[in-house]
Image (spheres, helix red, strand yellow):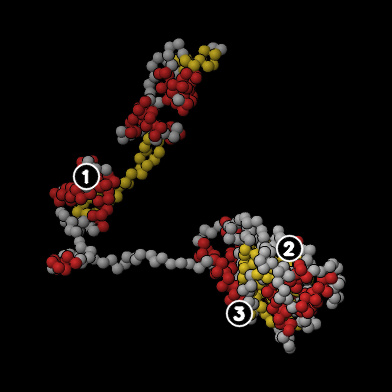
Amino acid sequence: MATRDVEAGLLAHLSTNAEIADSRSFASSLGVPHKELEDVIKSLSAFRIVESADITKETWVLTDEAKGYAARGSPEVQLVAAIPPEGASKAALKEKLGDVVFDIGMKAAARNKWIGFEKGNKDLVLRKVEDTKDELQEQLKGLENGEAVAAKVIDDLKRRKLVTKEKTIWYSLKKGPEFVLKRKTLATDVTREHLKSGDWKDLEFKDYNYGALGQPIATGSVNPLLEVRGNIENIFIEMGFVEMPTNMFVESSFWNFDALFQPQQHPARDSHDTFFLKAPATTTQLPNDYLEKVKQIHQSGGYGSKGYGYDWKRDEAEKNLLRTHTTAVSARMLYKLAQEKPFAPKRYYSIDRVFRNEAVDRTHLAEFHQIEGLICDYGLTLGDLKGVLEDFFSRLGMSQLRFKPAYNPYTEPSMEIFSYHDGLKKWVEIGNSGMFRPEMLLPMGLPEGVNVIAWGLSLERPTMILYGIDNIRDLFGPKVDFNLIKNSPMCRLGM
């Protein structure tokens, strides 16, 4: 029956009767499923054409297993009926009845003392009764037909998982304040045909719902890394830092390693850790006077240092590579600053891509972003570095910091930076820091007494994503899984 026919039948019945007490019975009289009538009731109720009252009742219904027992008998009765007078083997009964009915039937029939076993042969099952009364089947049929069943019986059926409780909802109906025998179809638009014919004057239009929500507007959202990057850039600018130019992804080994007092036999300079270029493989655009000073400090030392005591090779310094850190840019900027007279203190920062020849997995990428900050001034100490770090990270929401001694070729002393993470409930590493060595600064031409404090970290590091956004749960949702974000491919370093 079509929906409009169901609606017409309902309205016609209410026009001559005060109410419909049970929508289930009325659906049966129309010969339609109750769900179909329910949809019509909800539609008419919305326009106040009918008024409905919910009637809720919880009833016990049979499970699929119980419906099978109601039709074919309980497992114990099926088992007894399958045993011939001379008895039957367990294997034969299991094959005939199936594993489930056999297993349940054996236990129940033995409990009722309906079966026994041949002496000395536990495999042969014998009948001990001629007739059996199937009380379980009667109980299930009675429940299926809506008959009242004792509470003890319900408890037994629940224990055997043969019944489940089901909530049933139906309705009582009466005329509403806007009752009509036939509902009008209200117009929603004025069409070209309406205007041509003029019948728009006689149309009844559907009211506008000014409180209805409009269609959601499809908008983009800020990438989490860009959000964090913007926050960190603002912090650097607030603290008086100037951005360094980081547009040279291709760098020479000289600026990437040698100028940083990193020896040419250092493991980081191996092709397994660094991407070296094939074309152009080398560069000759290096400041020769400064290069000679770097060579001297590596080979023989100077400024109170013994150096590394090896044969420094220019060919190695001229090799081109994809920069492994933005500290190569810091070296260029400090060398440039050293050539400016008179010396003026500076604060520099950078946030840009660097490249490592690493196996890509859930916590490592071959390309990531490095954040770097440095201050160059007279008389700077490790205490100044710790103070600047506490100021910087507190602006990101990280107030609990710890420092651990570390080693870097171009900083001494060096410190790893840790912060306590409330979401992960542990201390996590968030960066590295130190004071640039005299062997790096003095060959550049910086004045005696000028020190440089510096620190760096990865933008993708999970701690930066989790700490760097004002409210991480606004971005990822109220039930954010910090460990899931920590282990995502977007996060380069594990914690």
The spot of residue 299 in percent (x, y) is: 84, 70
Q: Nearer the viewer, mark 1 or mark 2?
A: 2
User: Residue at horizontal 52%, vertical 62%?
Assistant: 476
User: Residue at horizontal 30%, vertical 33%?
Assistant: 145
Above or below, 65 against 443 in this view is: above
Q: Is residue 202 left or right of residue 63?
A: left
Q: Earlier in the sequence, mark 1 or mark 2?
A: 1
Q: Identify the element where label 3 is drawn.
A: helix
Residue 69 seen: yes
Q: Which residue is mark 1?
A: 1
Q: Are marks 2 and 3 in contact (CB under 8 Å)?
A: no
Image quadrant assignment for residue 250: bottom right
Q: Which residue is mark 2?
A: 268
Above or below, 125 against 423 in this view is: above
Q: Which residue is mark 3?
A: 238
Location of the N terminus by quadrant is top left
Amino acid type at circle 3 is Glu
Amino acid type at circle 1 is Met
The spot of residue 487 in percent (x, y) is: 60, 56
Compare residues 392 and 346 and report the one nearer the observer: 346
